[in-house]
Image (cartoon, rainbow, N blue to C red):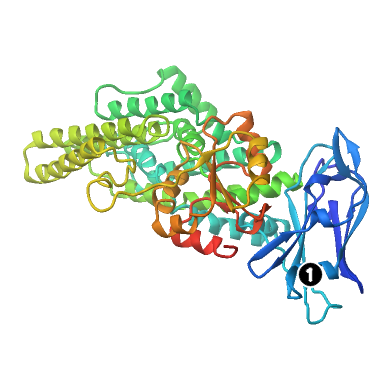
Amino acid sequence: MLNAGNSFLMPDQAFKTNIETTKENVEFTLTLDESIYIYDEQLEISIAYGKESTEITDKLVFPIPEIYHETNVHFGTLTIKVPKILIQQITNNSDAVVEFNFQGCSKAGLCYQPMTKTIEYKSEKIAVAQPAKEKKSESGTIADTLASGDVALILITFFGFGLLLALTPCVFPMIPILSSIIVSHSGGGKDMTAKRGLYLSIIYVLAMSVAYTIAGVIAGLFGANLQAALQNPIVLVIFSGVFVALAFSMFGYYELSLPSTWQTKIDKLTLKEDEESGHGVLGVAIMGFLSALIVGPCVAPPLAGALVYIGGTGDALLGGAALFVMSIGMGLPLLLVGAGAGKYMPKPGGWMDNVSKVFGVVMLGVAIWMLERIIPIGFTFILWSLLFFGSGLYLFRLGNYISKVIASLLLIIGIIFGIGVATKATNILDPLENVFGDKKTHLEFKRVHTVKELDDIISNSTKPIMLDFYADWCISCKELEHNTFSNKEVQNKLKDFILLQVDTTANSDDDKALLKRFNLFGPPGIIFWKNKKELKNITIIGYKDPKEFLNIIGKEF
């Protein structure tokens, strides 16, 4: 299975397929590499016609499986014949698509993503069958882009994906953090220029990109989601504490710095000493690295596609390069913010002290934003209310007209969050959701904890099923909950579904097993079943607004 370079076979090398029609059958032949096997229980054949799909696995004759590690598997070559008369009976002699689903692994321990091969069946001309375009999820299509081997196209494509992700909550929290770093390195405003602001931003973005790349390659090769592992309460509390300490430093209560002898050694070691101010950039790089792992954990289709490719092929070099370029694309707005902040930094004086205090408040906001992943929503509302109310009271003391106007706005926002506490609001972006208009209803999910529990529900259900992967620390999951799943059209569409949810907040072994079952590397991910058959082509990864969500599931329902 492994060549000299220790890379795994590409899927089309491990699984060679051929589909053809004879006078009486549609025949599917699967030839496996000698180091590959497929699971007998994962072999599924179904017929799709119109909006219906019927599984016919139990009506067909399969080769006798072998026992490998106490599991029924197939090696070598196997041929499965689907009688045309059976297709005619099921579809009432109409056009159909015959789908062959299978999943295999290597003896070396790598499991490939489930695969589907299809062929169109034309009732008017039985002897002719044309291969149908294989149905793939969005992340599967992106994995295929990587598998195309066109390096230039791949890197350009993933840079574009990064630019799109720059407009998501994956990157938004980085903006106030980077801005605060620039302020703290400004030397009271006298040392900061557009050039220096851009320089610090480049260091931050490069460190962020390295972190995303390392975490992605680890997840792809070993199935370990490093970002998810860092979303535990202890790490989040410590990192939030760091931001609180930074905030009070910017308020002027103390100055955070390493001992001078340490700082001198670090600057010499990293060769990053700045001639103008003497500040090393190691702290900036560390903050960029940790921010990527802890502050902005995201699993979007481009990231998932790259991880699927790395996991399926072992090609960490190309997959890692794609992730790095994507991260640079994500960080491009941060470079613009950094250069702009450096250029327009206020001149030294009392005004600069007020700018530092503003960013101190921003740092407190980042700390609250991180803590809301692990604390009750009501307590989150209280913290936001206190932050806005306290900031408003402070500004009122300054006495000038502009300060009082801004203070009034902050006090009103603080009061609004207080109302949110009193009315038990659940959407931090809409504290008055229970005051004005109809109270939003939320989908009721049944929690699933193990693979066996999920399989039992699927096998005993006659209704369509939706399975949602969620975590308390997942920003996009909360967007889905508050924006998409609370939408009345979406709720109406899903009213006949069995709604299941896996809470991966704890990142337990059972959580990891459920994620691995569907080749997911973290939430959010949404899987659908119809007639007990998984609909891989409408698997959803990342946030989708109500319109996008309905368009995707409308392909099958």
Residue at 48% of width from left, 59% of height from top? 493
User: Residue 475, located in which quarter of the rendered image?
Assistant: top left
Residue with the mark numbered 1: 89
Q: Secondary structure at mark 1?
A: helix
The image shows residue 190 at horizontal and vertical percentages of 27, 39
49 versus 277 height, above or below: below
Does 246 sit left or right of 65 as displayed?
left
- Front-most of 476 and 312? 476
Identify which amino acid the numbered label 1 is placed on. Gln
Residue at 16% of width from left, 36% of height from top? 350
Residue at 54% of width from left, 29% of height from top? 506
- Front-most of 74 and 455? 455
Which image quarter holds the C terminus?
bottom right
- Front-most of 221 and 439? 439
The image shows residue 453 at horizontal and vertical percentages of 64, 36
Neighbourhood count class around disc 1 (C-alpha, 10 Å): few under 14, some 14–19, many 20 upward: few
Does 70 sit left or right of 280 as displayed?
right
77 versus 225 height, above or below: below
Does 255 sit left or right of 137 as displayed?
left
Residue 344 visible in this rendered orientation of the protein: yes
The image shows residue 75 at horizontal and vertical percentages of 91, 46
